[in-house]
Image (cartoon, grey):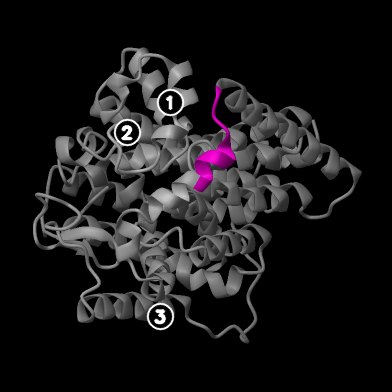
Amino acid sequence: MTARRSSWLSCRGGITVRPVSRAVRIRGDVVALALLVAAIAVGFGFGIRLYGSKHFPGAPDTFGEWPILAQWAPHIGIGTPLSIMVAIAVIAWGPSLAARLPWRKALLLAYLTSVGWIVSLALIDGWKPGIAEQLTSGDEYLKEVPGITDIGVFLRTFSARILDFQPDSWTTHVSAHPPGATLVFVWLDRLGLSGGGWAGILCILVGAVTAVAVPAAVAALGKPSLARATLPFIVLFPGAVWLGTSADAMFAGVTSAGIALLALRTKLSALAGGVLLGFGIFLSYGLVLIGLLALCVLLYPNGGVGSIRLLGIAVLGAGAVVATFALAGFWWLDGYHLVVERYYQGIANDRPYWYWVWANLACLALVIGPAVAAGLPRAWRYPLVAAAIVVILMADISGLSKSEVERIWLPFAVWLVPAAGFLPRRRWWLVAQAGTALMVNHLLLTNW
């Protein structure tokens, strides 16, 4: 067992973070709040919102983008007391438990608590609207599942049905993603776990893997104290609002697990990580950008022959996935080019680039919460956080993520969370994180 892997398995000691120079004076939380207020003001002032009559038939007139896709609908539900209890428990005992529990037990507790946090937030909307019906609308994956009786035919004909305005066009979400995303729900159905409830539970359970993968990767890369400081923040991640039954939650869980496996830096883990990340690009085209995080993990803190060898093994694993899909009849690049065309056949044409290129970042501010935003000026040099920032900026500038990034960027946003571990007075910042998620879910009825 290598020394680095051992540090991941037996991460111990108190939570200490190197103090930051007084030269760092940028208040990331203030900047994030200002950006969010500006996005809301400009969005309403210029009428940059989507009304039900045009794009969402049957939706209330208040259904729009502010800058997240949601409608103003203050409400409470069975999840209200549950989510408040989870938040209080993590704020009260999370930091101390993260500091003193054996590392494996700390990770297990983080996973279970994350599941509880995600489920309790979703239940604020109720079981059906919050979980069981989230993936059953006419635009979602489950609508197509009953018609996929032959997986071979599905893969061979997938690209031909991506473009819109033809009789057999895929639904919006199926066409907008590679076939791997739909295949997951087909396999779930074949196991006898059909319907929106099981699909929602799967997304929650896989999405909560981020609560283990992110701190595990940080610890494996030689920062055990930072990893422990990150644990309560990744558990109370405000993005948990969208980790609940969004398919992108599943994408985040799969790719974060892949990155964590690469961070272990063994041949077997590199191969497994490569396979997961390879499958990730068949869940969402944008996840090809995760490759930058993979390079960061494999080449940090220094490169060398060993790192290059592990990179080669990871590429081999990812390549095997690409080859499997290609032999089955789906070529990733063909799908990507057609998806770009499909993107501009619809709602993207009504979303002005000049607004969303910065309003997306305002949306991200709600997803990561004030603590992570406050920590970014202190943590942006930390390789994992820096790589995540670059990936997000690349996705933003591309113009292929105009709006809805509260779910689309979940696989990237979770890697910003270690920035909160650089902050002092972490308990108060945990209050701010929990408050953000509770406010969003109680005041707005989100689309996911």
Front residue of this view, candidates 366 and 374: 366
Residue 254 percent coordinates (x, y): 52, 36
On screen, residue 238 versus residue 157, left or right, reads left
Above or below, 415 relative to 10: below
- Label 1 belongs to which residue? 183
Mark 1 touches mark 3? (CB < 8 Å) = no
Disc 3, SS: helix
Disc 1 on helix, strand or loop?
A: helix
User: Of the residues shown, which amino acid type is indicated by label 2?
Assistant: Tyr
Residue 157 appears left or right of 311? left
Residue 250: percent from the left, percent from the top?
Answer: 43, 37
Residue 142 is situated, as x and y percent measured from the top left of the image, at: 29, 29
- C-alpha separation, residue under disc 1 versus residue under disc 3: 42 Å
Which residue is label 2 attached to? 141
The quadrant where residue 63 appears: bottom left
Lateral position of residue 107 relative to residue 85, left or right: right
Point 45% across, 26% down: residue? 157
Q: Residue 268 — which label?
A: none
Name the spot of residue 183 as percent of width and height, x first. 43, 26
How far apart, in angstroms, are the residues tagged by discs 2 and 3?
A: 38 Å
Label pair 2/1, CB-CB below 8 angstroms: no
Decide whether residue 336 is among the magenta residues.
Answer: yes
Secondary structure mostly taken by the magenta-highlighted segment of the chain: helix
Please tell me how crowded label 2 is: few (under 14), some (14-19), or many (20+) other residues with Cα within 10 Å. many
Are the residues tagged 2 and 3 within 8 Å (C-beta)? no
Please give the residue where the numbered disc 3 appears in the rendered image: 30
- Membership of 177 in magenta stretch: no
Q: CA distance from mark 2 to mark 1?
A: 9 Å
Residue type highlighted by circle 1: Leu
Mark in the foreground, 1 or 3: 1
Question: Which amino acid lies under the numbered mark 3 shown in the image of this protein?
Answer: Val
